[in-house]
Image (cartoon, rainbow, N blue to C red):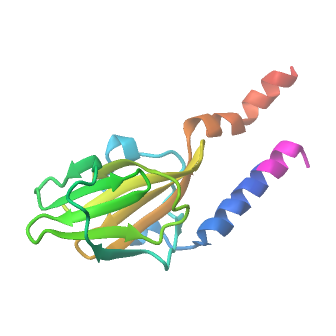
Amino acid sequence: MSIEVCRRILLFCGLIALLGLNNHALSQSPKLSSPKSHRHLRIGKSVGVDIPEFSMAETSVEADVKKENLITSRNRKYDGFTVSGSRLFVVERGTEKVFEICGLPLKWRPFSNLTWADNQTLMFDRWSQPHYGVHYAVNVKSRKLLIAAPFPDKFYLEQQRPERHKNKKG
């Protein structure tokens, strides 16, 4: 077995162990119209993870806290934002209740690409390493995690193509 194959297997197994990958089909989740920034390569309909520690805990945020990546749902009912990059909050605008999304793996890693798929589904990513991340979708109304799916970026996928390795040899 080549070093590259062993490396890929080890990477994949490590990610599975880290995220607790189960066979929860994404097709069981409601269909989401993914914005362009969330149309990730290699997120299949049969890939997903179960994260039992996930919660949306009611909390408060100090008035002078710096809100980063602030986005508002289309119906203007919810705001989503990060604090210090690695903490993610949702504010229910009518009641002013604040919830923090908790229990996701790699809590020291920042969230990216916050966007609303619809009026109640917040989508975002968290990268586990430079070329591998996890895509999430949360229904903020029901406070349920809909999707947690690992995905590689384009650079990683191009490195795995057999044609590239053949060209190097010949």
Which quarter of the image is occupied by the C terminus?
top right
The image quadrant of residue 159 is: top right
On the picture, is 126 further left or further right than 155? Answer: left
Extreme-right residue of the structure: 1
In magenta stretch: residue 127: no
The image quadrant of residue 58 is: bottom left
Q: Nearer the viewer, residue 83 or 116?
A: 83
| Residue 80 position in % (x across, y down) | 26, 56
| Residue 22 position in % (x across, y down) | 58, 74
What is the span of residues highlighted in magenta in the rendered image? 1-7
| Residue 2 position in % (x across, y down) | 89, 44
Q: Who's the residue at 40% across and 51% down the image? A: 84
Q: Nearer the viewer, residue 35 or 143?
A: 143
Residue 28 seen anywhere in this rendered image of the structure: yes
Extreme-top residue of the structure: 170
Q: Who's the residue at 39% across and 76% down the image? A: 55
| Residue 152 position in % (x across, y down) | 58, 46
Total numbered labels placed on residues in the image? 0
Residue 120 seen anywhere in this rendered image of the structure: no
Q: Who's the residue at 25% across and 70% down the image? A: 60
Q: Who's the residue at 18% across and 55% down the image? A: 73
In magenta stretch: residue 6: yes
